[in-house]
Image: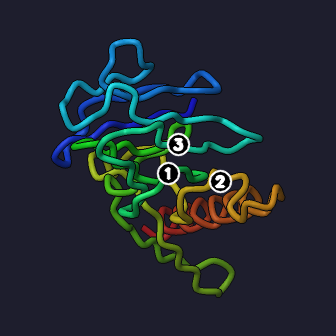
Amino acid sequence: MPSLIVYMAGREIQRCEINKTITHVGRDPQNDLVLDNSSVSRVHARFEYVRGNFVVRDVGSRNGLMVNGKEVRELPLRYGDRIGVGKFVLELNSVGRIPEHKLIPVTIDTEVDAHDVEETFAVPITSLHSQAIVPRHGPQPVEDLDGDGSMKGLIIAIVIGALVAAGLVAALLLT
């Protein structure tokens, strides 16, 4: 389920699952995501799920709305976008996606069928032994890397996974 990760002063303080078509954000307790700080208007922003995409709208806030450092009134969003609401930063996160700033690059160099294969992955900082190895291709879901509805991304992920597995098996056999 998509979610908004809430940060203040660079620290994650809350996660809010987006399970409705319209999600209101503001200081008022009636909002779906309540940000209790005077820098946030009573009803500050609205996230809408429209035709398969999220759109954020400023709904008359005092301090405005920023997306990736630029002031906006309304803007379609992509996973990974960072939305400034007062002193808070909200990150639109997809299902199971690890926020970009919590990943570190790891290069796996293997030899498969006499061809050198090198691919850079992003893995969670907290655990290099995690089973979640995510190709570093930006905020799109793996199955639609190009945003065109094709399955190229899924096929690429399967091929990369097979190459990595073959490299690991080869490394085990050589040791």
Residue closest to the eye, 16 or 60: 60
Marks 3 and 2, the one that precedes in the sequence: 3
Circle 2: is it few (<14), some (14-19), or many (20+) Cα within 10 Å?
some
Q: Position of residue 128 (x, y in %)?
A: 33, 52
Q: Position of residue 149 (x, y in %)?
A: 82, 55
How far apart are the alpha carbons under marks 1 and 3?
A: 6 Å
Q: Position of residue 41 (x, y in %)?
A: 31, 32
Determine which of the numbered discs, if any, sits on residue 105 in the image.
Answer: none
Residue receiving disc 2:
142
Task: Please state if 106 lies on the left or on the right of 18 as rendered.
Answer: left
Name above or below for residue 126 compared with residue 145. Answer: above
Quarter of the figure that contains the C terminus: bottom left
Which-is-in-front pick, marks 2 and 1? 1
Q: Are marks 3 and 2 in contact (CB under 8 Å)?
A: no
Q: Which of the marked residues, 2 or 1, is nearer the chain's N terminus?
A: 1
Q: Distance between the residues labelled 2 and 1?
A: 30 Å
Dot 2: element: helix
Which residue lies at the image location 44% right of the left edge and 19% below the top edge?
Answer: 32
Residue drawn at the location 32% of the way across and 52% of the way down: 102
The residue singled out by tag 3 in the image is: 57
**Residues under labels 3 and 2: Cα distance?**
27 Å
Q: Residues within 10 Å of mark 1 (few under 14, many from 20)?
A: some
Q: Residue at x 59, y 59 (%)?
A: 165
Residue to which mark 1 is pinned: 73
Tell me whether circle 1 and circle 3 mark residues in contact (CB < 8 Å): yes
The vertical placement of 108 against 139, above or below, is: below
Looking at the rendered structure, the kind of residue marked 1 is Arg
Type of amino acid under label 2:
Val
Q: Residue furthest right?
A: 150
Q: What element carries label 3?
A: strand
State yes or no: discs 2 and 1 in contact (Cβ < 8 Å).
Answer: no
Tag 3: amino acid = Arg
